[in-house]
Image (cartoon, coloured by chain):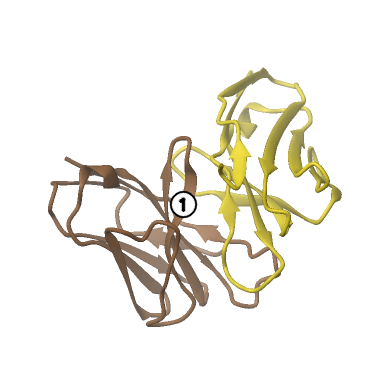
Amino acid sequence: DVKVTQSSRYLVKRTGEKVFLECVQDMDHENMFWYRQDPGLGLRLIYFSYDVKMKEKGDIPEGYSVSREKKERFSLILESASTNQTSMYLCASSPVNSPSYNEQFFGPGTRLTVL
Amino acid sequence: QKEVEQDPGPLSVPEGAIVSLNCTYSNSAFQYFMWYRQYSRKGPELLMYTYSSGNKEDGRFTAQVDKSSKYISLFIRDSQPSDSATYLCAMRGNTGGFKTIFGAGTRLFVKA
């Protein structure tokens, strides 16, 4: 089974702190994604990566950066956390040779609260 | 206007009921239509997908796509308490790239 793990299930940080969210997948997938999930807004893509050291902005990249130094690991960084970044963060991966519907495999999510 | 609209619910039904979950969309370029199921405190998992218009059945689940109306549905027959979850529709086009657009999700409760 594909397994996507996220470093924390729950995280509480203070405004202005630098926050690191880590994601690891064990199926050798090329593509990795970071989403945030908010009630009524669904999943919104923050960043994705299709290869090591490659990254592309999604729909809402402002206030976030990412790092992919190894194929299995994709990190989301909040340079200076703000209260409007309180959300559920979901990491996902998919193989590059996926069928065109591109099934994505999700981690369990990290619920981040910024005070 | 959002590219994909989905009623967030919650939708509460008795066990055994037929459930209908729906999404509308605006982008006629979408070709692949997926339904993900998300249990509480878990990430979404792919439930079904269809390509272009038509129906697809998998056990108690039927996915339906009407491209002329830009409307997709997921039907659950003989609903069970274990079907209680949030159901997200998702769709993407046929061209290259990695962009999948997700709906907001409909929260479903099936009461025993």
Output the chain of dot 1. Answer: A
Residue drawn at (67%, 45%) of the image:
B25
Relative horizontal placement of residue A103, taking residue A42 as reference (left or right): right
Residue drawn at (39%, 56%) of the image:
A60
Say if residue A78 shows up in the picture.
yes
User: Compared with residue A58, is residue B9 higher up or lower down, i.e. above or below?
Assistant: above
Image quarter where the N terminus of chain B lies is top right
Q: Which percent across, then down, holds residue B94? A: 72, 67
Q: Which percent across, then down, holds residue A95? A: 58, 73
Disc 1 crowd, CA 10 A, few/some/many (<14, 14-19, 20+): many
Residue drawn at (54%, 60%) of the image:
A105
User: Compared with residue B40, is residue A82 higher up or lower down, i.e. above or below?
Assistant: below
Residue drawn at (77%, 25%) of the image:
B18
Relative horizontal placement of residue A24, taking residue B103 as reference (left or right): left
Q: Which percent across, then down, holds residue A109? A: 40, 50
Total number of numbered labels?
1
Chain A shade? brown
Say if residue B88 shows up in the picture.
no
Give, as a three-letter code, the residue at label 1: Arg
SS for callout 1: strand
Chain B shade? yellow
Relative horizontal placement of residue B66, taking residue B12 as reference (left or right): right
Image quarter where the C terminus of chain B lies is top right
Residue extending furthest toward the right: B54
User: Compared with residue B85, is residue B68 higher up or lower down, i.e. above or below?
Assistant: below
Residue A51 or residue B2, whichever sits in front: B2
Q: Which percent across, then down, holds residue A47? A: 41, 65
- Which residue is denoted by mark 1 in the rendering? A44
